[in-house]
Image: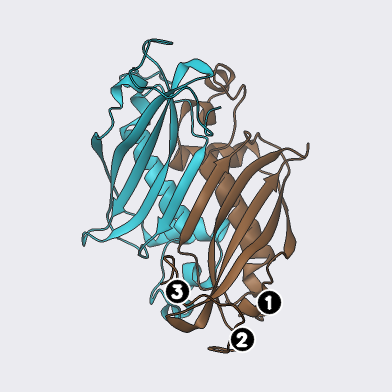
Chain colours: A brown, B cyan
Amino acid sequence: MSTPTIRYYWEDLQVGSQRDLGSITPTREEILAFAGQFDPQPFHLDDEAAKASVFGALCASGWHTCAMAMRLMVTNFLHEAASLGSPGLESVKWLKPVYPGDTLNLRHSVLESRPMSKRPDVGLVRTQWAMFNQHGEQVLHMEGYGMFRRRHPGAPVPDAPASSPTDA
Amino acid sequence: MSTPTIRYYWEDLQVGSQRDLGSITPTREEILAFAGQFDPQPFHLDDEAAKASVFGALCASGWHTCAMAMRLMVTNFLHEAASLGSPGLESVKWLKPVYPGDTLNLRHSVLESRPMSKRPDVGLVRTQWAMFNQHGEQVLHMEGYGMFRRRHPGAPVPDAPASSPTDA
């Protein structure tokens, strides 16, 4: 496979910066396929059951919504970033159902950033993911962590805390 | 589709109860298929890139791990529960990589439980999901919320708080 050019290192993810990471539109067939494999609850697979549920109509698994957000994240950002994966998330909120044909836009913001005390070549950022449908309604909110290689390993950083519970 | 018999209502999810929700073994093909669709980072798709990464070998997307946990949750529990979906999670931790052929076991625990003040027919539980591989290593930790229909809507509940920020 082709090796993409790395444009974004830890230093490039400034606190307060925001990125629009494009949009994705799940089809009915994709929603049914994901649910059939991973979340076969009636309101994700069956029109009648969904109509009778709190969602009112067939809707995507919340995990499918997360996975679609990840797809936008990788295609439109991580693909060109020195990403080293994520230790986890501290918040996932499924705010509104996602229906077939909805167009979902992802906005990604950097909330905090600091070097990892035990790994001088790695920096940690805390980020927020916000996904909206075509009506401007937010359907997904997430906050979590990402690890990125540093452009300048071990360089001094102003006001960097010595360590924290999330340090690896 | 067949309508399953509901065995579990909110009242049946006692604080402190644990359930073993079975196991799942992702194949290499399944890991590649999920990553190709939702998380096309090199260490999820390419052996050489994965070998050079922090993961040491090709491994599953963390979102795939979550989705597999959900599959076990639905097949071995929610399928027979009066589940009304989930407003979200307050913690996701990807603790160890998941490799092709790993056998993953899911254990689900009820941490807290209370009625929803604004919806007398619904109760909320806070639950913990713990997934382990065949070596006994924990690969995934999640804590989140689930909403379930009450067997006895509006019945008085001892020590129930009047409301809370997560009330819907």
Give the number of the mark in front: 3 or 1: 3
- Camera sees residue B9: no
Residue A84 to residue B166: above or below: below
Using the rendered view, name the quadrant where residue A107 is placed.
bottom right
Question: Residue beneath label 3, please?
Answer: A163
Q: Amino acid at mark 1?
A: Asp
Q: Amino acid at mark 3?
A: Ser
Using the rendered view, name the quadrant where residue A55 is placed.
top right
Spatial CA distance of label 1 from label 2 is 9 Å
Classify the position of the N terminus of chain A by image quarter.
bottom right
> Which residue is painted at 49% across and 65% down in the image?
A86
Question: What is the secondary structure assignment of the residue under circle 3?
Answer: loop
The disc at residue A12 is 1
Are dots 3 and 1 in contact, CB under 8 Å? no
Question: Residue beneath label 2, please?
Answer: A151
Classify the position of the C terminus of chain A by image quarter.
bottom left
Position of B67 with respect to A105 (left or right) is left
- First in sequence, mark 3 or 1: give its number: 1
- First in sequence, mark 2 or 3: give its number: 2
> Which residue is painted at 39% across and 22% down in the image?
B160
